[in-house]
Image: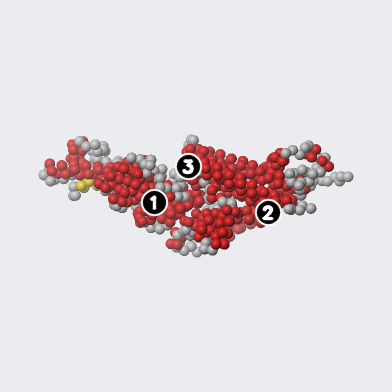
Amino acid sequence: MTTPTHQHTPRVGAGSARREWPLFLLLVACLGGAAGVVHWLDARRHAPPPAPRLSEELYVSPQAARRLSLGFNGLAADWYWMRTLQYVGGKVTAHKGRIQIDDLGALELRALAPLLDHATTLDPQFMAAYEYGAVVLPAVDVESAVRLINKGIEANPRAWRLRSHLGYIHWQQGRYPEAGTAYGAASAVPGAPGWLGVMAAQMSTKGGSRDTSRAIYETMLRTTEDDQMKRLALRRLLQLQSLDEQDALRGLLAAHRERNGGRCAATWRELAPLLRQTRLKSDASGSPVDPSGVPYLLSYDKCDVELGLRSEILRSY
Amino acid sequence: MNERAVAPAEARGDDAAARPSGTPLRRVRVIAANAFREVVRDRVLYNLVVFVLLLTGAAVFLGELSAAQEAKIIVDMGLSAMLLFGVFIAIFVGVGLVYKELERRTVYAIFAKPVGRGEFLTGKYLGLCLTLAVNVAVMGAGVSLALAYVKGGPDPLAYRIWPAVALIFCELMIVVAVALLFSSFSTPALSALLTFAVFVIGHFSADMRSFAASTGTAPARILFAALYYLLPNFSHFTYITDASHGLTPTPAAFAAAILYTLLYVAVLLAASTLIFNRRNFK
């Protein structure tokens, strides 16, 4: 025998909605009240003390972080990488004066080396982190930069790029024999491009020359994927071009002076015939312009050439 | 078929019982299909929506934050999320597979038919593995699409991630088997806790080995060495970071990992069946 059963399903009709509206009202009112209390508390709370320097220190060692990552080490490395970029970006933004990405020594980036160490210990094949370390870290702590790249070379012995980064660090520090050795080692890696051998030879003969610098930054511009690095390389190449142009202009000034009994040219117009013989670009008034299009200044007192005040060549990054 | 299976199904006169009971493989297949349907009905695959949102967000916003590393981060994030979501499903659904049947007492109806307890467990296991396979495949396709979107066209990385995806699935297969083993004799809460502990320890296997090598006393050395070989070793399935650099495991390493999975799952299912056989449902 079956007993008829009624499925009792609660229905939300107009009546029940009317009964429930005080509840909704109470909910909204309490939520608004809670937000108000928080706002009141925030307004009365004392400003937090300035962050201690310890806040820049990392709590776990890179090895511990790797162990604790439970197979998510790649993701943890990405986290440290983005934290590195935010850390440097934050310091650059807070800095008032002009600054270049490869000359951030003034920013006191104490946590930069540990952050990059963490990122590369968690992911030993993280080439972008090594490259960033090779360019940015030497101005902060050159030995940490060398250690970072050497660690990368140990983990990736077939990565010629890391050895060339090591060469770049040594070259920046004026250690040309070490730079030559590093570029030589890079060229010996199977599959390495031919220019590394040329660079190795160049280091021992004319390590500090503009040609070497140009070759290094042209390579950086060609090979890097990082926009910041590309901008840095481009800027350095423009600076090198400007230095060449300034040398050429000094040569013209000297020639003019020689022809005019030791008198320096007062305006660029006086040099117009000589300027026309060169490939230097000029503006409508006949003044030679730098690679950013701003006219060079002629210093009559020193009989020398200088960058214009609005020149973009020395602009910060 | 197991001797504990209750035979007189014909007495109830239902369709399944009226038909010949079929081969053990068929019975396992039917249970697996049912388990799969049950898990899908539980809306477990809704996690794919979260995954898609995560990947879309990563693909759109990470370009600005990562300095040209968005492809690497998409792979790291996508495959890590795949593993994490998969582990949660394996643990929380895996521990409930048997428990729910016991709690609802549907297990009596099942064992009233000519179904062995081993077949029941294997079917349940395969059903959840099928769910995870669908989950992992859809997530893998999502990561590949996100990579193509970021690259603006076909990206070799999009297909080089698939061996790592397959190994994540292998790892999840072991985690499901571990969850099933614990749930065959313990409560869901304890089973989940123990399974998670095994997942964590499985990623510390390299440390276990170094403990074994560095410990001074012989018993401790033997203990750690025994634990190293007894507990699942997940370090051989961890290719997420390599995949983000376009690196794939060697064919030998890949095949060995799959063989290890099959052997270990067989061990765990056999152990689960042995324990489950001893349970009294009266």
Circle 3: is it few (<14), some (14-19), or many (20+) Cα within 10 Å?
some
Q: Amino acid at mark 2?
A: Pro
Q: Is residue A172 visible?
A: no
Rendered location of residue A172, percent (x, y): 31, 50
The residue beneath circle 2 is: B188
Q: Residue at x 25, y 46 (%)?
A: A205
In contact (CB < 8 Å): disc 3 and disc 2: no
Mark 1 element type: helix
Residue B5 is situated, as x and y percent measured from the top left of the image, at: 76, 46
- Whole-angstrom CA distance, mark 1 to mark 2, is 49 Å
- At a point 61% along the width and 48% down the height, the residue shown is B264
Residue A149: give its label. 1
A83 or A265, nearer to the observer: A83
Between A251 and A16, the one nearer to me in the picture: A251
Report whether residue B241 is seen: yes
Q: Which residue is mark 3?
A: B246
Asked whether A219 or A317 is in front, the reply is A219
Q: Amino acid at mark 3?
A: Gly
Identified at 82% across, 46% down, the residue is A6
Q: Are discs 3 and 1 less than 8 Å apart at CB?
A: no
Subunit ID for the residue under disc 3: B
Identify the amino acid type marked 1.
Ile
Question: Helix, strand, or loop for circle 3?
Answer: loop
Residue B74 position, x and y percent, is 51, 44
